[in-house]
Amino acid sequence: MKYGLFKYETENIGDEIQSIAARRFLPSVDTYIDRDRLGEYCPDEETKIITNGWFMHAPYQWPPK
């Protein structure tokens, strides 16, 4: 099993703070997942992610596969 953390293309520092907080609850970070392209993410094995954020910029990306 892998553990993932969101990455962003934004100037909103709140997004970064949420990832820093989520990181504290993961035993490791094996992959970084683009939050705004979450629906395109196809992991090669089960991946756990703490999802936080506002997903309405690209609602067609929700829910993830």
Image: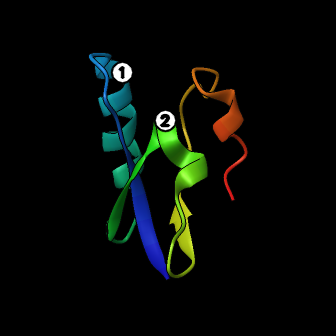
Tell me what residue is drawn at x 26 percent, y 16 percent.
Answer: 11
Tell me what residue is drawn at x 35 percent, y 53 percent.
Answer: 23
Report the front residue among 34 and 26. 34
Report the front residue among 26 and 15. 15
Q: Please identify the quarter of the rendering in which residue 31 is found.
A: bottom left
- Mark 1 vs mark 2, CA separation in Å: 15 Å
* Residue type, mark 1 in image: Gly
Tell me what residue is drawn at x 57 percent, y 78 percent.
Answer: 46
Mark 2 Cα shell of 10 Å, populated few (<14), some (14-19), many (≥20): many
Tag 2 or tag 1, which sits nearer the N-term? 1
Q: Is residue 43 left or right of residue 11?
A: right
Report the front residue among 13 and 65. 65
Q: Secondary structure at mark 1?
A: helix
Tell me what residue is drawn at x 54 percent, y 47 percent.
Answer: 38
Q: Secondary structure at mark 2?
A: helix
Q: Kindly give the residue lying farthest to the top in the view shown.
A: 12
> Mark 1 — residue?
14
* Position above or below: 16 against 24: above
Color style of the picture:
rainbow
> Mark 2 — residue?
36
